[in-house]
Image (cartoon, grey):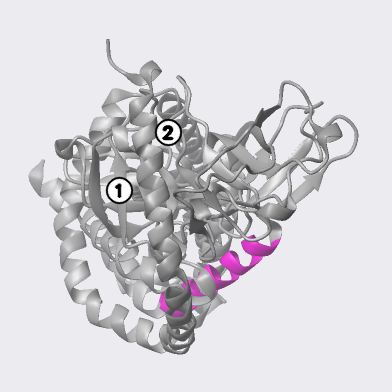
Amino acid sequence: MPLYSAGRRRVIIALALTSALLLTLDLRGNRLFDAARSGFTVALQPFQQAAEVASTPIERLWRAYSDFDTLEEENRVLRAQVDAQRSAEIAAQNAIIENQDLLALNSLESLASYDSVTARLVGQSPTNFDQQVEIDRGSIHGIRVGMPAVNEAGLVGKVTRVAPTSSVIMLVTDPSYAVQVKILSVGGEDPDQVVPGFTTTTAVTEEESFPGADQGAVREEFPIATSTSTTVVLDDRVNLPEVEVIRETGVLRGQGDERLPRVSFVAGNSAFGRIEIGDTVFTAGGSTSLAPPNIPVGRVANVITRAGTAGQELEVALSPDLGRLQFVRVVLYQPPTELQP
Amino acid sequence: MIGFLMNSWVARVIPIGMVLLAVQTTLLVELRPFGVSVQIVLAYVAATGAVGGVDRGAIVGFTVGLMYDLAVGTPLGATAVTMALAGYVAGIGRLFRIESHWWILALQSAVGAAVGEAMVPVVRLVIGEASVSPTGLLTVVGVVTAAALVASPVLAPLGRWSLSLQRSEMKLPPEIRAEV
């Protein structure tokens, strides 16, 4: 049969049209397809379990070969870091507790307000173009599509597919991922830089001091990252200089595995030029956001100034190491707009 | 009806697809040479196309691609169309070759797998899903092609079995061979 016979052409056209039809129906949302996916996932599970048992020795061998040198070096560096962080952690935990108490006292929303389900990662995306992981908890554990997933370091992603005993999480780095975030920056040396409407000037009288406070220095870190040299002063109240907290919101979008996620702002942003490398990025929350507020996302790694009125873009170095995830916590949060009436 | 199904290619392709999908979603997500996930399912489709020709390659690719979409959660039809194309392209060589040497099949499989994998970001872009940098794409296609080339001697007989092809169907009829 020649390459372009009538019969062959019919087969190709039929396949192409079927694909287009299926894609259209699926992208518009189709319960039948969702049910088929769930059913197929269940049917595939015995095969996967068998393959997992058979492939575990091969995986271990591969890891031993490919990761040993890296792990040894990393272990040495991490031990040094753990020693350095131990004292900082105590101060940070204290700050977190105080923060949560204050939020609860003022009836404000925080991550601690929601139940969560801890899940183990059981698989990654088998494709080379998606950033997804699979976890071993699903709808029978209360997980629903859209819920945010976090770990100790911060935001990991969101649930995109739920089966009874497993779920798929789209990672923050996936190009399809987007979440509203806020960038918090502590500045304030030059009062002329304060732009009404985008900055809040707060007179801070905290019961703590830090090196240089008496010379009018401004603390560089967000309070949660109190340095180890911080000393808590209980009796003598120290009046710190006025601290200006720049709070700007934007949308964080994944850029794929090889590039850092970016936050883009609307054009004409009056906080232009005020955000600096190292500023902290948190989820912004809100009635339509898929994540509650104040989940750490990362730090600003690069500020990109675009020409004309295109506005500013930020590259964000994520807090969690998405390549080394073992466990995640799915926060049982659904935005009000997603809740069933 | 049951007898027909048991003897048809569907009864062989679907279980093979399930096993390969299980391997794809377990072992091959961990073993990532150069950070790339080797696509064993795509390699199987390309190898089947190489031994079975364009029609059968495209149909098997479409079927296995649908299973892949169902298992992985990609939009239904997105992988099916790329795998159908991979099977089709791999099968084109069968129209021209005289003997089915293993290395010719391997080359056909590699070309089919390369085209199939390269089409994934194109299809995703068309449906507004992902953007992939050209540098990353070259590495991905390179590794997937090399894997299909290496795996072909194993996957081509598997593809031949799943299509219930006889050895004689792999070659030209004796009278035509004599003329050639």
Residue A301 in view of the camera: no
The amino acid sitting under disc 1 is Arg
In the depicted structure, whether residue A123 falls above or below residue B108: above
- Residue to which mark 1 is pinned: A329
Mark 2 burial class by Cα count in 10 Å: few <14, some 14-19, many 20+: many
The amino acid sitting under disc 2 is Ala
- B73 left or right, relative to B124: left
- B86 left or right, relative to B154: right
Question: Which residue in the rendered view is the most extreme toward the right?
Answer: A308
Residue A123 place in picture, x, y as percent = 31, 59
Evaluate whether label 1 is on the same chain as label 2.
yes
Residue B6 place in picture, x, y as percent = 13, 52
- Mark nearer the N terminus (1 vs 2): 2
Question: Which residue in the rendered view is the most extreme toward the left?
Answer: B2
- Describe the element under mark 2 as helix, strand or loop: loop
Kindly report the secondary structure that dominates the magenta region of the rendered protein: helix
In the depicted structure, whether residue B112 falls above or below residue B102: above
Quick check: is A81 in the magenta stretch? no
Q: Chain of mark 1?
A: A
What label sits on residue A291 in the rendered view? 2
Residue A306 place in picture, x, y as percent = 84, 41
Q: How far is disc 1 from disc 2 in space, using C-alphas?
A: 13 Å
Residue A54 in view of the camera: yes
Mark 1 burial class by Cα count in 10 Å: few <14, some 14-19, many 20+: many
Residue A325 place in picture, x, y as percent = 37, 61
In the depicted structure, whether residue A101 falls above or below residue A124: above
Q: Which residues are magenta?
A: B135-152
Residue at horizontal 56 percent and vertical 57 percent from the top: A257
Q: Chain of mark 2?
A: A
Residue at horizontal 53 percent and vertical 56 percent from the top: B116
Label 1–label 2 contact, CB within 8 A: no
